[in-house]
Amino acid sequence: MTTDQYVITVDDLRRKYAGGFEAVSGISLSVARGEIFALLGTNGAGKTSTVELLEGLAAPSAGTVRVLGHDPYRERAAVRPRIGVMLQEGGFPSDLTVAETTRMWARCTSGARPVAEALELVGLGHRAGVRVKQLSGGERRRLDLALALLGRPEVLFLDEPTTGLDAEGRHDTWDLVRSLRDTGTTVMLTTHYLEEAETLADRLAIMHRGRIVTTGTPAGVTASRPARIRFTLPDGVPAGRLPLSLQAAAQGQRISIRTHDLQSSLAELLRWAAETGVRLTGLDARSASLEEAFLEIAQAESAGV
Amino acid sequence: MTGNTMAGGAMSGTPARTSAAGRLAGLGQAELTLLIRNRTALFVALLMPLIMVLATSSSLERVDLGKAGMSIAEASLTGGIGMVLILVVHLNLVSAYVARREELVLKRLRTGEIPDHEILAGTALPSFGLALAQCTLLVVAGVAFMDLRTPERPDLLIAGVVVGMVLMAALAAVTATVTRTVESAQITTMPLFLISVAGSGLFVPLEVMPDAMASVCELLPLTGAMILVRAGWLGGAASGDVATAALTALVWTLVSVFAVQRWFRWEPRR
């Protein structure tokens, strides 16, 4: 891939706050044009601190960021007309109406869509005359999204776009983001909803304590994780009688097996059970989900520190 | 959510860029709407200057203005222009900047195309408009009903008002950095208000003060603008005094702008 296919490139990025706390500790990533890239992490992992650097809201303490070939902080005027930003917490004057807010924003946005079109896009058309302070949390998120989309941006930054939305609103937003991607928009998304990252993202990175611990496609990230088989042995059958090749971990009679080849391991287990006449209660075998991968990474990292 | 089909994609080609005038007009209009909907702010901006002018003129009856060479009406109406600058521009804007910062409006605006100085300027536009209208009203009322002469040097008068507005806006941004909430703005705006009323000739003209005190007061933030305003309306100022006043006002403005660039906070303290 040539460099101009990458819309966002980040190299060894760091962000240290005035108090000395380092929220971003040397991350590198690149996002290709037309890709939905999700930054996942627990609260305090450094997602928002990272995205703020990509948006050009603050200067990094070290490392480089390029968005559309420019430094988003120093060359703000070159970058801003081509990006759309939705902050984690949007700020709008509470005494303006939805339409007034959008109109104000439109006059500050190059090539802005008509106000009515922008509000229709996020399903807020019927709320145009309502004051911002009377909106629900979910409606405020939609207004924020409408403003981010106002200038038909090439790159869209969405910081937890569906927090506070109900299930239907969340699916609407996903559909909208996908349709934007399909017409060439690059989307950088942070979320702590694993389902959101799994269904929406082309690629993702999992952040923990300011670092990227895993990156890849949702399928790739889960595929690199072991699948798991769990069951309970009957009393009187010690775990030591299980085939050694299964590498089982026992907690009393509760057995857990991690494997990168679920089919073979399961076949071996069932063959052993059939041959020895042992009944496996509560048998459960499953491939790794993003959620398991995520929890495992978070736990492993926490334990390792 | 309807109409995903019209979601449209990234812009191809280069769209027409926004202009500074368009951005300022957009932000200014929104701020004007907010000012009209904020009754307390509107009351302070519309009625307080008038009340202060009346209060000044009634208390000046006990002051000997002979040394200043101006009548009570002249002293209180020119002082009224200073009142407008400090109440309509400074007081009002400290509240506006703090409110927008605490509501995260400033942070959200900074994600857009509008540059920082335009955010501060656009927010100030309705206050500037209101202040200009009130100053005009004071001059017209003074000439029409209170036998004041028409301004001797309109250019100096306008320069005084404009430099005063810009300085008050810059000082409002400085004051906002040390103001945590809209409520505490009532306290943080007091020092400049008191210093200006007492020392910049809003209440008592500097000429009435002892010389040593007057020369200290000449260095206060709003004094330069006030000297320009009085020289412009009433005339009779030596050109050296006018130059010194203009220079003082300019230095204060530059220092304030530097302070804003250095210390202004765009989001709430966490």
Image (cartoon, coloured by chain):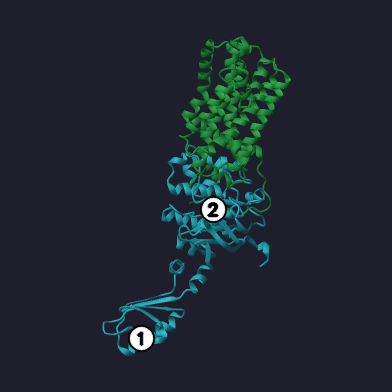
Q: Is residue A166 left or right of residue A104?
A: left
- The image quarter in which residue B156 lies: top right
Does residue B175 lie above or below A63 as drawn? above
- Tell me the quadrant of the picture where the N terminus of chain A can be found: bottom right
| Chain at tag 2 | A
Residue B87: in sight, yes or no? no
Residue B246: in sight, yes or no? yes
Does residue B210 lie above or below B176 as drawn? above
- The image quarter in which residue B253 lies: top right
At label 2, counting other C-alpha atoms closer than 10 Å, the crowd grade (few under 14, some 14-19, many 20 or more) is few
The chain displayed cyan equals A
Mark 1 to mark 2: distance in Å? 53 Å
Q: Going from the N terminus, do you reach mark 1 or mark 2 first?
A: 2
| Chain at tag 1 | A
Does residue A93 lie above or below A221 as drawn? above
Residue B138: x %, y % from top left: 59, 18
Residue at which label 1 appears: A242
Helix or strand or loop: what does disc 1 sit on?
A: loop
Residue B25: x %, y % from top left: 61, 35
Which labelled disc corresponds to residue A17?
2
Q: Name the outermost residue toward the front.
A: B212
The chain displayed green equals B
- Residue name at image x 56 percent, y 40 percent: A103
Q: Nearer the viewer, mark 1 or mark 2?
A: 2
Frontmost residue, B218 versus B47 = B218
Q: Amino acid at mark 1?
A: Leu
At label 1, counting other C-alpha atoms closer than 10 Å, the crowd grade (few under 14, some 14-19, many 20 or more) is some
Does residue A178 lie above or below A125 as drawn? below
Residue A265: x %, y % from top left: 42, 83
Q: Amino acid at mark 2?
A: Tyr
Residue A100: x %, y % from top left: 53, 38
